[in-house]
Image (cartoon, grey):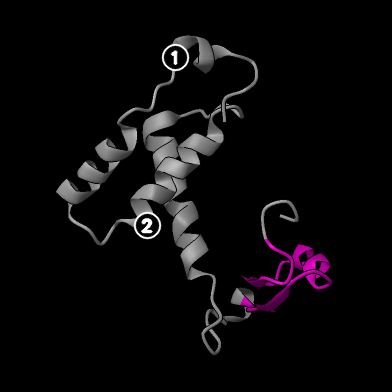
């Protein structure tokens, strides 16, 4: 997390004690679902819970396995769909195709041991 999230960012978390180690570098609030606290003054974990539920459905329903090498691309695809869930299907497809124009991934790059993110 230290490599991916800016120091000082606000973190909303559940009661897991591992989040306590972040207090020095991040602002934040914790809620306690085990005590039936799911939201307090706008603090909740609904968004990340929803994201992981969708990721698990994609993994179990489509991929069945992700390699460490390509996992970030698979996660990016999930986030792309989630971030555009309010749009209609045709606009999502149009945006996806526009982003793919000019992009090229050769088989050699795909199977290379490094250099593909």
Q: Kindly indicate the quadrant of the structure image that contains residue 104.
A: top left
Magenta span contains residue 89? no
Instruction: Pick whichever, 89 or 8, lies toward us.
Output: 8
Q: Secondary structure at mark 1?
A: loop
Which region shows up in magenta? 6-32
Residue located 83% across and 66% down the image: 21
Residue located 78% across and 67% down the image: 22
Q: Is residue 69 left or right of residue 76?
A: right
**92 up-or-down from 73: above or below:** below
Q: Secondary structure at mark 2?
A: helix
Magenta span contains residue 28? yes
Q: Kindly indicate the quadrant of the structure image that contains residue 12.
A: bottom right
Q: Which mark is residue 106?
A: 1
Instruction: Point out residue 71 in the picture as x, y percentages from the top left corner.
Output: 54, 34
Q: Quadrant of the N terminus?
A: bottom right
Q: Which residue is mark 2?
A: 83
Q: Kindly indicate the quadrant of the structure image that contains residue 44.
A: bottom right
- Mark 2 and mark 1: Cα distance apart in space: 28 Å
Q: Residues within 10 Å of mark 2 (few under 14, many from 20)?
A: few
Instruction: Point out residue 64 in the picture as x, y percentages from the top left corner.
Output: 46, 29
**99 up-or-down from 50: above or below:** above
């Amino acid at each position: 997390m230290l490599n991916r999230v800016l120091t000082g960012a606000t973190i909303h978390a559940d009661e897991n004690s591992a989040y306590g180690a972040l207090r020095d570098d991040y602002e934040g609030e914790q809620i306690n679902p085990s005590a039936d606290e799911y939201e307090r003054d706008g603090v909740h974990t609904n968004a990340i819970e929803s994201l992981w539920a969708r990721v698990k459905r994609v993994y179990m329903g489509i991929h069945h396995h992700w390699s460490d090498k390509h996992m970030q691309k698979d996660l990016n695809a999930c986030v792309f769909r989630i971030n555009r869930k309010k749009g209609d299907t045709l606009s999502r497809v149009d945006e996806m195709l526009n982003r793919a124009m000019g992009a090229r991934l050769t088989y050699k790059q795909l199977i290379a041991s490094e250099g593909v993110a």
